[in-house]
Image (cartoon, coloured by chain):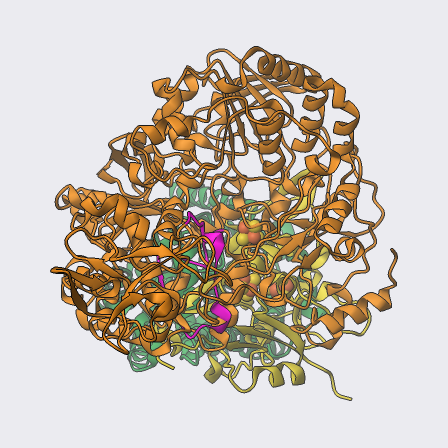
Amino acid sequence: MKISRRDFLKAAIASGLVATVPGGALHTLIEKPAHKPGQATYRLQQGERAGARLYRSACFICGQKCPIKVKVDGGRILTVIYNTDGANDSQYACCGRPHTIFEARTLKERIRAPLAREGERGSGSFREISWSEALDTLASWLREVEPGEVIVFSHQGCESGIVKEFFKNIVGVPNVTKHCDTCHTAIDYASWWVFGKLIGPSGFRPDYENARLVVFMGRNPVEGIVAAPWTKMFAEGRKRGMRIIAFDVRRSRLTALADKYYLIPPGTDLAAALAILHVILRDGLYDEDYLRRYTNAPMLVYTDTLEPVGLADNPKVEGKKTYKVLDEADGAVKWKTEATRPALLGEVNIGGRTAKTALQLLKEAVSSYTPGWAEEVTGVPAEELEWVARSLAYEAPRAFIDPGYKGTRYKSEGMLFRVIHLVNVMLGAVGARGGVAWNKKPKIKSPFKILGIEGLGPQGEPLYKYWEEHGVAFVNHKCYSMLAIRSILEEKPRRYRMAIIFNQNLVAHVQGSSDVIRALKKLDYVVVMDTVFNETAVYADLILPLPMFFETSSPTLFTPSKTGTGQLVVVEKAIDPPPGYDVRPAWWIIKELGKRLDPGNSALYEMLGEHEYIWRKQAEDLGIDPEGLLERGVATLYKSPIYHPLKGKSLYTVTGEIEVLNVEGLSRYRGEAGKPSSFNPFPAWIPPAWMSQGPLGDDEAVAVDICHRMTATNMWIRYTRLTHSTLKWDRMDGVLIHRGKAEKLGIRDGDTIVLEGPGGSLEAKARVTEDIHPTVVLAPHATNPGPAGGWIKVRYRSGEERLRLFHRTSGAGLNTNMLHRLGDMVMEEGGRAIQNDVRVRIRRR
Amino acid sequence: MGRRRVMMLIDMNSCVGCMACVVACIRENIARQQGGGVEIPEDAVYHARTKPEYAGMELGLTGDTPIFIQCQHCDNPPCEMVCPTGATYVDEDGVVALDHDKCVGCRACIAACPYGARTIYRRPLTGEPLSGEEGFQPGYPDKCTFCRHRKRGDGLWTPACVEACAFGARLFGYEEEVLEASEGRAVRLLEALGTEPKILYVLPVKGRR
Amino acid sequence: MGLGRLATTITGIILAFLFIVGITLYRAGEGGEQALIPWGMMVVGYVFFALASGGVFDSMAIRLLRGDEETEAHTGLLAWSSLALLVPGIILVLSDVLHPTAAPYFYLSLNPESRIAWNAILYLLYGGGLLAFTLLVHLRGASGPLARRIAALTLAFSLLLEANLGMAYAVNVAVPAWYASMAPILFVALGFAIGSGFTILTLRLAGVTTPLLRDYAEELRYTLLAVAFIAGWSLVGMAAWGDAKATAVEVVAGRVAPVFWLGFAVTGVLVPLVIASSRPIAAGLLAIIGLALYLAVPFNYAPQATRLEVNPFYMLLAHAGPAEAGLWGYVVSPETLAFIGGLGVWLLLVVHRSRVLDVLGLRG
Ligand code: SF4
Ligand code: SF4
Ligand code: SF4
């Protein structure tokens, strides 16, 4: 479909695309789409120079996949602009990171051709091989090993979905894992306790736009990753009067924008959250009606056995249970479904046994977590914590504690997010407008399904089954990268021979880098697919270089749906890789691999290159107009997120309600009550690991890594001079250490320091500051290559090349995973990481 | 009709400090993309023509108030006053511009600017940025040009930083429109000096509202 | 050639060599970042030489116009010395500006609001007048009415140039310690003081030991008192004026205080005041050194450096940007070499005056 410039202009104006720019600016913001979307085949030649063209893509620097437009002319990237559907502009944005793509193309660290290892594994020597040799080698390895001996690690990148699906369903690898156990697993786990299922952070939508007060603990929607649309809603919210209270270990843009902020010791947010819950329960600041209607707060529980007084099939909701309550209307104990006004608090005597309501038990459980107690842990004055709790209650339900994004930093984090959920429930904010709404995410039909490429499915048992039988609870069946490393090391349940690592920097990203290196060294074959050299690629036997995300079109639509309104985005190729770079996208690799491993389906694999065809089918499957989507590059499927406490129907819990005391948890873990345990069915204080090891010495600190506005997890962006220059500007081009501590240790700004942790040590540059809590040393994640910082030697056909990671920048920051051990994972919460919960010793070199 | 002056409004309530504008400015005006490579000066952010910082009491602001350091396109520019050759001048749109041909390199403009808007780079750089002659050139005092190289014909244009901001924090337009959009909430920095800046800041609203 | 002359010549050659090295290094970009301290030692250098040249000329011209016969006898020498001081000054101007090829725009596209533009004009007028006067006295002697008229006119240009150089500093609203300061009058006083010093040295180099030397030693004392008074008064003014106070504190008690007290107050003012009548040559030399130090550090450097602490924008730039070199980096730089080396040019020209005049065919 062709549309004229005038039509487009009209549409753009009608849609509000230009609302923020005064009249005359139209002609540069709005481009007639000169380029027809959809490039069916992958061109290796330099694109023709036919004037500036605007391409629709999505940023894959972090996991959010924000829609962007890239304007290109003559091999140069002219502009990067966020793409929007116009009508829902407040949910479309991109952050500063994709603006760096023009530098990314020619980074020294880029892998420019398929490479085979030379010399010992990890020696950093490689030689160029042809694509056919690379693919033949990979195919022969895959024929040689059994699928059960392979582990596929896939992180992000445009095609991680099809990579996972191909290896799992077609090659039959039972172990295909993502990385959430080093990212947000504790949040998923916390959700199980309150909502009945592992729900990741993308399941919720903090409704900043309509909120009046938001408290942030362990989340920075301004600088964090997977954030841009949330950041936009955050900014929108601020404009509309949303107030912010932040708890953090450092001063940042968030604290600068906050109405009030507190610097606290790392991992002690839980104490503050418990105190807030304490005040709300103590003073009855909760939403009674909400608790009665949507939660099991009135559920009567025997105090001796912690069993519900009764549990029976709910006649009104299929598959869910109801329970006994005390009806305030007549003082009788009856099924909730029959009660007029179930009591929220109180106790009754039933046949000589005492029973209390769930809310009563909750209140008693947190009765000792007074603001005074929390003040001792966090340093935040008790009256301030009272004030925070009261302010939340005052603004409820348009007030909440942010449900967070990252949740694998501290031992206490599973409990922290559980308490946060509980506070939000007390406020009646879960499911409320201006509270924490539920996300809606469209299911996009996979290209394999569309093309009818089928496989046998996984051949064998996944390794997490073994660990579930050996003490690891709540494993997320899509995310068990740490357990996989353990399996390789311990050869349990079997010996593993091959790892295929797609866009996942395991060594840098998994807690206990030296353990990961040992694991990789144990394998027969290590295959890495990535765009740049990194801490993991140096241990590969075979490296398949990928184009940058904007250098390829993708065979599938994407959904950057963490907005809750079902965004769809088309990814076209914006620019070719630089001349002479022999890199291929994952879909092409899979197409070729498929043809080799599954020759009978060759014709179907060939179709993987027919991107526009697939997009159209996917769009049709979702019931949306493919023309509109292809024209614009984006579409929004839903009008709003789900504003309903129970997600519109009933939740995943036994009762189908929000459970302030989890019925299943009570039956499984009643023995843990009263203990500082993650399984404790009641909210409880669990100190972070560093705290339980006694007071910090003068030369000790907790190593904390953060997300900086221009870094993301393990991507090339950290190698750019643009990022480095920003870090330098922000005085973060090293490790931040508090002035007081630095003075005691004789460390001056700019000194080289050594950080020693239980799992390894790092050399870094000290940046002395007062903007952090004195207990921490802090830097952006993965800004130090550690042991992988040596020279890499590549024999390209065009000549030998020597480079180092952070070749033109510094790499003098931090990576807490390198200081840590794999073994310190939290077994109760799916074998997740505690990446910031590590004590280090600091000295001047 | 008198000349129509352009102005920029930066709403620090909407700005989240994402750096998009800064990097876009570097890409447009500072860095060079050429021959398959990219040349970026050392300390690129320092040399960017707009850069985020926090100011406080010194500006009569409270606490860590986010602002941008950049040329304020003063209507009464001290840098223009001291420039001996008229290399620094105010163009017909009110943009404080530099004619590189006329610049002798005396650095009086740098000394004269109360906003720290001008930087200078003394190492060699080859090629040209996207903005061509209006771009960053070693040995010349550099500062924001409001991306006036983007102007076509008589109309208004969109500066790179404005285009890059996904959060609607930057607004560029003619004086009347920008003043209207500011709804009287905006301030000018160091107003007492009489420089009459053409950049307006809406400062973050904080505290118990 | 006598031993003294030989030694002076060698010193002159070495200094002149440093002059070339300093300028070359500076132009090769070794000057570092110039955004935080935009005006470095070469600016001080050209201001210094302009003041020195003007100062030598001014008192000579005034004496001449008053009919002082002794002065008249040495007019050629002093005019020549004055010219020899202007030469390195002008070379430094053209070396300091980063794009000297654009210098014609000083005149083709003059901005009348700019003090630097007026400097360009006044340099030309003063330089032209000085050249004309020098030629005239060498060819026809200094006694005629024409010489007097030119002397009077050039004197006016010289005083204007000195004051205008000061104004180039004083118009900077962005540098608190300079803004609306007494720099113009200070510069005129400095011109006389430095000029007296150079006149004494010039006479000594030429072997003149007449009472004229004593007169100048006396003049040095008055003018030093004037400089000290204005400099002190400026400090009091600064201390009472908002952001400039930081500079006053920096000068009297901060990192640059040693330069102010030892370099300027003691070496440049006190000692010369005391010894001027007994040892005029030493007094002149010390005054020149002390006043150069004063111009370089308390006057030129300190206000720029303290602005990095008082102006919020510069404060942030200095905090987050590339490191600023500090006083040490400011002083130990190619620019300083060029400045000091400039003295070699003057020295050679003065010592070998007769030879140069011969070459130029200017023996009247
Ligand atoms: S939030 Fe993530 S995906 Fe979105 S623009 Fe930023 S880095 Fe890219
Ligand atoms: S792009 Fe917008 S939100 Fe981001 S830093 Fe710039 S002005 Fe602020
Ligand atoms: S208007 Fe242009 S030159 Fe000025 S700061 Fe914005 S992008 Fe840079």
Quadrant of ligand 2: it is: bottom right
Magenta-drawn stretch contains A331: no
Q: Kindly give the residue lying farthest to the bottom in the view shown.
A: B1
Residue C23 appears in the picture as rendered: no
| Residue closest to the eye, A823 or C345 | A823
Name which residue lies at 52% across and 54% down.
Answer: B45
Q: Image check: C305 left or right of C38?
A: left
Residue A193 left/right relative to C341: left
Which of these two is toward me, B75 or A547?
A547
Q: Say left or right for A775 vs B103.
A: left
Give the colour of chain C: green
**Magenta region includes residue A200:** yes
Quadrant assignment, res C115:
bottom right
Q: Is residue A480 above or below residue A382?
A: above
Q: Position of residue C56 (x, y in %)?
A: 46, 68
Residue A263 in percent (x, y) is at 27, 60
> At 42% across and 30% down in the image, what residue appears?
A507
Q: Colour of chain A?
A: orange
User: The N terminus of chain C lies in which quarter of the figure?
Assistant: top left
Q: Splitting the image into 4 quarters, where does residue A632 fall?
A: bottom right
From the viewer's side, name the closer residue of A836 and B143.
A836
Image coordinates for residue C340, horizontal then vertical, percent: 43, 52
Residue B44 image offset from top left, x and y in percent: 53, 51
- Check the picture and name the quadrant holding the C terminus of chain C: bottom right
Q: Is residue A275 visible?
A: yes
Q: Which chain is yellow?
A: B
As rendered, which of C315 and C90 lies closer to the eye? C315
Total label count? Answer: 0
For image coordinates 41% across by 79% down, the residue present is C181
Residue lying at the far front of the rendered structure: A351
Q: Which residues are magenta?
A: A197-225
